[in-house]
Image: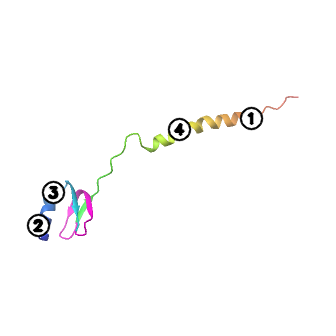
Amino acid sequence: MSVQYYYNLCNECMGQDVEITDHHGKKYAGKIEKVDHENVYLRQASAPSAQGQGPGLFFFPLAAGALIAIPLIGIAGFRRRRYY
């Protein structure tokens, strides 16, 4: 197929999610942003985020532990002196 055929095909699919395979067999997936006679510019699709797998779930127990431990360490480190 000719370069003009693929150029027209990519222009028709502008803004759509596509998967393109190059002549080496490597696959690219994304949304077509721009096309010229030598290149196709894709905006890669972002990976779907897993619910409940964000950094907040990791840091929440750490932050809660620090908020509890710091005052307890302060209390344990405080020793009353006898009043003479």
Disc on the earlier residue, 4 or 3: 3
Mark sitting on residue 13 = 3
Please tell me whether mark 1 or mark 4 is closer to you in this view. 4
Disc on the earlier residue, 2 or 4: 2
Q: Amino acid at mark 4?
A: Pro
Please tell me whether mark 3 or mark 1 is closer to you in this view. 3
Q: Amino acid at mark 2?
A: Tyr
Q: Amino acid at mark 1?
A: Phe
Disc on the earlier residue, 2 or 3: 2
Label 2 sits on a secondary structure element that is helix
Disc on the earlier residue, 3 or 1: 3
What residue is disc 2 on?
5
Is the residue 75 above or below the residue 5 in the image?
A: above
Disc on the earlier residue, 1 or 4: 4
Mark sitting on residue 61 = 4
- Magenta residues, as a range? 23-39
Q: Position of residue 48 (x, y in %)?
A: 33, 47
